Image: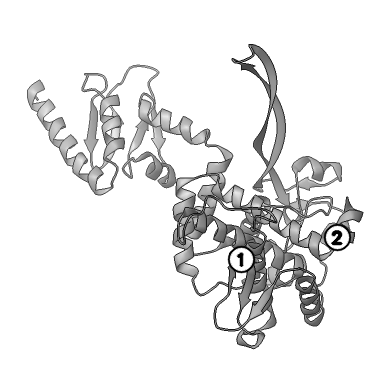
């Protein structure tokens, strides 16, 4: 084929691909790929039945295997294509994906759940054996409960994998106990915050000084169901307290919180201006669990007052981003508190509208879910301290 005719054919195919890209809402990616593939004799892409291959046949050149569907989607590559080792766009994409920071990975995981219409922090009580395990919070190898965002991450993992036991540990912790993780098992990612310092130069004084900062790192843990050879104590499942005892404990807990609570009407809310909680009458709820988990949600809101934890999230009006963040904090706090009190929590009637607002917040800020979980944990710890100050002092 004459060179001009060949180029015309290529341009025609590129134009057709442009339309496909527009339909897929991925035109910017296509333009980057087009720039990375100049029409030179050694790098002319040849299309045929939806595949992409490199025209170069020099020794040592290799064509990479087809992209898997998830990777193909994220790279903006048509299904069925193969990727060339010289395709810089794909290489850059792979490098960027592998360097995704922990906040982004966590946010993507939570967003995937929310976009399916699921509140992942409600799953431990959705039924099945997990609901009767007697310990809703995930536990470390030491028996200490996880806190904050790690609770949420391990709840999701346990539900997805069908794990009943709440206990998790690292590979090395299992080895130290004379046990081993079974071959082929995949662990769950959890995070921890650390503190460190760095030397910075002060332009005003002309001197160097130490500046503190916090960092977030990830590590991998395995459920005891994935580990062989553990001591028997890790396989003993504690039974939940009788229903009556749990309800009595919840009543005693909230009675010890010095919040003003009024009953009446058909709405539940916290009013910052009057610093009081409004709840429907106890009889209006389907059961005691519904009443106390709703009260827990509003009591977490109560902790935001400037005389307590002074939490605002920059909220200026009803329905803005700050409002959505505070609701997310209260949702997580209510779930953590329900886990501590052995209560079953159910979705609220405003389920869909709140999920939409949370999705928007998380899409705009990858740190939002981690921060919300941290604030929720702080609020729950504050309430536990009010309810049982003696126990807090003994633990300290």
Q: Residue at x 58, y 65 (%)?
A: 273
Secondary-structure class at tag 1: helix
Looking at the picture, tell me which residue is in the foreground, 301 or 195: 301
**Quarter-wise, where is residue 297 in the image?**
bottom right
- Is residue 64 at all visible to an observer of this figure? yes
Which image quarter is the N terminus in? Answer: top left
- Is residue 187 at all visible to an observer of this figure? no
Q: Is residue 188 above or below residue 119?
A: above
Looking at the picture, tell me which residue is in the foreground, 281 or 334: 281
* Image x and y of residue 110, in percent: 54, 54
- Left or right, 86 with respect to 186, comes to left
Answer few, some or many: residues within 10 Å of disc 2's Cα (few below 14, many 20 plus, some between 14 and 19).
few
Q: Residue at x 82, y 42 (%)?
A: 175
Answer few, some or many: residues within 10 Å of disc 1's Cα (few below 14, many 20 plus, some between 14 and 19).
many
Q: Which residue reaches farthest top? A: 206
CA–CA distance in space, label 2 to label 1: 31 Å
* Image x and y of residue 14, in percent: 18, 35
Which residue matches tag 2?
A: 389
Q: Residue at x 35, y 36 (%)?
A: 82
Secondary-structure class at tag 2: helix
* Image x and y of residue 219, in percent: 68, 40
> Disc 2 or disc 1, which is closer to the eye?
2
Say how many tags the image has: 2
Q: Is residue 144 above or below residue 212?
A: below
Q: Is residue 45 above or below residue 72?
A: above
Q: Is residue 100 above or below residue 123?
A: above
Which residue matches tag 1?
A: 123
Looking at the picture, tell me which residue is in the foreground, 4 or 151: 151
Dot label at residue 212: none
Q: Residue at x 67, y 67 (%)?
A: 299
């Amino acid at each position: 084929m004459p060179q001009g005719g060949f180029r015309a054919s290529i341009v025609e195919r590129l134009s057709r691909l442009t339309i496909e890209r527009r339909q897929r809402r991925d035109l910017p990616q296509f333009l980057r790929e087009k720039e990375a593939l100049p029409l030179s004799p050694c790098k002319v892409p040849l299309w045929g039945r939806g595949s992409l291959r490199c025209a170069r046949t020099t020794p040592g050149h290799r064509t990479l295997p087809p992209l898997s569907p998830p990777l193909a989607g994220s790279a903006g590559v048509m299904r069925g294509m193969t990727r060339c080792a010289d395709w810089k766009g794909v290489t850059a994409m792979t490098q960027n994906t592998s360097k995704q920071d922990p906040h982004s990975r966590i946010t993507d995981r939570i967003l995937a759940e929310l976009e399916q219409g699921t509140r992942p922090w409600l799953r431990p009580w959705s039924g099945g054996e997990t609901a009767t395990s007697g310990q809703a919070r995930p536990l470390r190898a030491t028996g200490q409960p996880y806190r904050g965002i790690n609770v949420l991450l391990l709840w999701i993992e346990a539900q997805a994998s069908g794990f009943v036991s709440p206990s998790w540990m690292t590979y090395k912790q299992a080895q130290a106990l004379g046990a081993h993780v079974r071959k082929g098992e995949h662990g769950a990612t959890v995070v921890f915050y650390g503190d460190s310092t760095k030397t910075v130069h002060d332009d005003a004084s002309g001197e160097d000084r130490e500046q503190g900062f916090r960092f977030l790192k990830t590590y991998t843990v395995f459920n005891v169901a994935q580990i062989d050879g553990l001591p028997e104590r890790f396989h003993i499942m504690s039974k939940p307290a009788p229903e009556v005892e749990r309800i009595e404990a919840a009543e005693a807990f909230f009675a010890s919180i010095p919040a003003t609570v009024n009953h009446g009407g058909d709405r539940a809310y916290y009013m910052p201006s009057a610093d009081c909680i409004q709840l429907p009458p106890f009889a209006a709820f389907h059961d005691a669990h519904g009443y106390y988990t709703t009260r827990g949600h509003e009591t977490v809101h109560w902790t935001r007052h400037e005389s307590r934890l002074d939490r605002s999230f920059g909220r200026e009006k009803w329905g803005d981003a700050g409002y959505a963040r505070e609701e997310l904090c209260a949702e997580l706090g209510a779930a953590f508190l329900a886990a501590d009190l052995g209560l079953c929590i159910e979705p609220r009637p405003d389920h869909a509208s709140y999920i939409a607002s949370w999705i928007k917040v998380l899409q705009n800020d990858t740190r939002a879910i981690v921060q919300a979980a941290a604030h929720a944990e702080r609020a729950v710890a504050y309430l536990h301290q009010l309810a049982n100050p003696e126990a807090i002092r003994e633990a300290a």
